Image (cartoon, grey):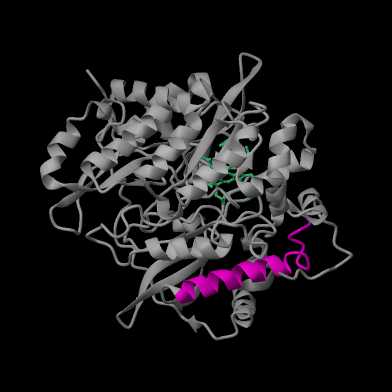
Amino acid sequence: MTIATNTKVKLNKIEKVKAAKHGLDVKQELESFAQMGWEAMEEDDLIIRLKWLGIFFRPVTPGKFMLRLRIPNGILSSEQMRTLAEIIERYGDDGSADITTRQNIQLRGVHLEDIPDIFQKLEAVGMTSIQSGMDNVRNLTGSPVAGIDPDELFDTRELNQKLQDLITNKGQGSYEFSNLPRKLNIAVDGARDNSIHAEINDIAFIPAFKDGEFGFNVLIGGYLSAQRCAEAIPMDVWVKPNDEVIELSAAILKVYSENGLEEGLRENRGKSRLMWLVDKWGMNRFRIEVEKKLGKSLYFAAPKDEYTMEKRDHLGVHPQIQEGYSYIGIHIPVGHLNAQGMYDIARLADVYGNGEIRATVEQNFIIPFVADEKVEAFLAEPILQQYPVNPSPLVRSLISCTGARYCNFALVETKQRGLKLAQELDTELNIPERVRIHWTGCPNSCGQAQAGDIGLMGTKAKKDGQVVEGVNLFTGGKVGKDAHLGSVTQKSIPCDDLKSVLKDLLISDFGATVKS
Ligand code: SRM
Ligand code: SF4
């Protein structure tokens, strides 16, 4: 991809690193990195460029890397799950995995010297971690019940796989699509319940019919960050699956990438997400530039989206469109698992389903294709004590980012604290409806605090004259149809005081009552 040159523009640090050597170039050097060890590596390769391969150096646990995969539409096989379990198993207590808020899986505890072997294992089962970090398109999300949902409008599985193949050059790495000015999130949804948080994706393809024909309206520019949070806005064009979605995605990525320098997006990383380009140009010019890149006209004045359902969490037993089969959503507390947990999930998929496993943006798994006659035995599985199908109300809808245990941006520990608090409040209160609590360790908002009924964002607070861990409290987030972002309603609550604040809020705003 050609990038316009403008010598007057100052490049930010990351752009300078990329200009010196492209992130994907380190793929050829992996063997030598593995031999020399991470301590001997050049810092920019270690901390920045390895992320083009999905390998994240963790300053909190030096030498124990995180490997972020790509799982298009959140779907993987039991064989793939077992491969992931084998990878982390060799690291004992250090090895673990997390389901991410983008329907994806990250592995922890990984040693650099093992990476060449790990990449071979991944390739053998058709998986890749390529371009899952830094200035790349993140995991492509779609409805986790694509192809099995009785209410579905379009099955996005093939489309999301094709889109990933384009963006990553079939997992080998694409120089064309891996030098964006910043990260970029794409979601393609064929469900009626906005299963993918369209509003917070840079590009969201959302279901819309034109004259009875199925296609997608396109939303642009949604994102969350410490500097700014923006809800995606309609590009107001309509495209058909699959080729038009792929062509349009490619054109938008090229326009974003090629104009990044001229438009200052490669200067200030705080003002570099796609929405900043749309702001600069206005949607009209943005559409025209995309059309120019496409080499053909787009259909304007797109029809309204088909989001008619409230967002489902997919936990429990649900009939599929295929008669005689159900999908069963199981709860993985804060999305965290060890190798044994992953083997157990793979076994459930093989014994009761068709070997398929699906991850959700709520950090849970779904086992599809459970024949009706096997449902009872499935529900009697002892492993469901650990991964229940019907957990208590707050635990059920708890989402959490990585937090201080592994992430150096974190201002607070999130996962364990969030889980403990939800468990305690579930024990003390009757809570009539689902209350979605989203924890996020810092303003980057990977845990999407703005999407929660209640959002908790790590910050510093003061208590008894001391600086302590605290949170800013968000309320009013709405997901599903008519989704919108919540906002901060209370600042710097010390974590030690949080339980009583949440208790009061659940009673006053969510109809909770104290258990007698
Ligand atoms: Fe994120 C950076 C974890 C979803 C916004 N995110 C990071 C890093 C890589 C920072 C770092 O190097 O430590 C975190 C890795 C921690 C670790 O060890 O796990 C991290 N982000 C995550 C995950 C794992 C959170 C989770 O527990 O699920 C999610 C991985 C998704 C995936 O599979 O790719 C994750 N991150 C998100 C989301 C949510 C979403 O996509 O719906 C957001 C907000 C939406 C968005 O991007 O607009 C998000 N992450 C960020 C940002 C702020 C971006 C910005 O424009 O400023 C950063 C910081 C950055 O990129 O500089 C960030
Ligand atoms: Fe780390 Fe902050 Fe993202 Fe949490 S929100 S994973 S603390 S960068």
Magenta stretch encompasses residue 259:
yes
Quick check: 31 left or right of 491?
Answer: right
Q: Residue shown at 46%/24% (left/top)? A: 416
Check residue 306 for magenta coloring: no
- Give the image quarter of residue 431: top left
In the image: residue 209, left or right of residue 475: left
* Picture layout, residue 285 above or below residue 153: below
Check the image and report above or below for 234 versus 496. Answer: below
Left or right: 316 with respect to 266? Answer: left
Q: How many marks?
A: 0
Task: Measuring from the top left, give residue 189's x and y in whole percent.
Answer: 39, 62
> Whole-percent x and y of residue 302?
44, 77
Image coordinates for residue 515, horizontal then vertical, percent: 24, 21
Image quadrant in which you'd find residue 404: top right
Q: Main secondary structure of the magenta part?
A: helix
Closest to the observer, 283 or 57:
57
The residue nearer to you, when weighing 470 against 136, is 136
Q: Residue at x 57, y 39 (%)?
A: 117
Q: Please, which residue is most extreme toward the left here?
A: 373
Q: Quadrant of the N terminus?
A: bottom right
Which residues, given as a range, are shown in magenta? 243-267
Q: Is residue 227 visible?
A: no
Q: Write down which quadrant ligand 1 falls in.
A: top right
Residue 185 visible to the viewer: yes
Instruction: Give the quarter of the image for residue 444.
Output: top right
